Amino acid sequence: MQKTHLKSPIGILEICADENGICELNFVDKFVKTEVKDKNLKLCLKELDEYFNGNLHEFKCKFQISGTPFQKSVYEALLKIPYGKTITYAELAKNIERQKACRAVGSANSKNKIPIIIPCHRVIAGNSLGGYSGGEGLKTKIWLINHEDTHKSNN
């Protein structure tokens, strides 16, 4: 597995990849400069940089969707939420034909190993923003939602 780091507007991101693609994106405290040899990891860094500059709406880098069958269905559905849009946990549960699984959908979101690329930040509660387990929590989710709303006409 190869790791690299990116300084972003929402903190330092550690991106991990193996032969199957990007497998983790973590919020970390320490930036470690590394030489990136993996082409897909280089592409991911470039795409994340473009995303944070408001010029990328859909990631093309190869990544792994891992988890239970239920979690994978949630992550696949997350990938269908358009850039700059939000939906509720209830809508996401309905989209995967599990209408009563709102809490389970929220739990799956919190276990997403590749946030931003698999856009769990685009899911909100019916009467609030809900939660966010990455970075600085809700502050990070709000930044991502506002960033996409500001740049949705780009591209």
Image: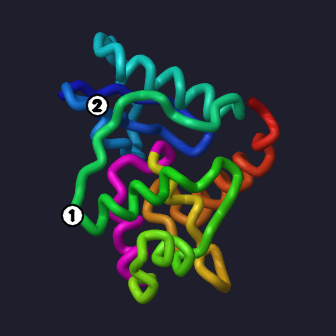
Is residue 116 part of the magenta span, yes or no? yes
Measured from the top left, where is residue 27 in percent x and y? Answer: 41, 47
Measured from the top left, where is residue 52 in percent x and y? Answer: 63, 34
The residue positioned 42% from the left and 76% from the top of the image is: 97
Q: Is residue 137 above or below residue 17?
A: below
Res 74 visible: yes
Label drawn at residue 8: none
Count neighbours of disc 2 (C-alpha within 10 A) and say few if under 14, some if 14 to 19, many if 20 or more.
Answer: some
- The residue labelled by disc 2 is 21
The residue positioned 63% from the left and 74% from the top of the image is: 129
Q: Is residue 3 above or below residue 68?
A: above
Assign a secondary structure to mark 1. loop
Res 130 visible: no
In the displayed image of the protein, which residue is found farthest to the front? 97
Q: CA distance from mark 1 to mark 2?
A: 18 Å
Is residue 4 part of the magenta span, yes or no? no
Assign a secondary structure to mark 2. strand
Q: Quadrant of residue 155?
A: top right
Measured from the top left, where is residue 107 in percent x and y? Answer: 36, 74
Is 53 on the left-hand or right-hand side of 124? right
Task: Give whichever of discs 1 and 2 has the lower sequence position.
Answer: 2
Is 3 on the left-hand or right-hand side of 115? left
Measured from the top left, where is residue 28 in percent x and y? Answer: 39, 44
Q: Nearer the viewer, residue 11 or 141?
A: 141
- CB of mark 1 within 8 Å of CB of mark 2? no
The residue positioned 35% from the left and 14% from the top of the image is: 39
Chain part drawn in magenta: 103-117
Q: Nearer the viewer, residue 85 or 149?
A: 85
Say which amino acid is labelled 2. Gly
- The residue labelled by disc 1 is 68
The residue positioned 47% from the left and 24% from the top of the image is: 45
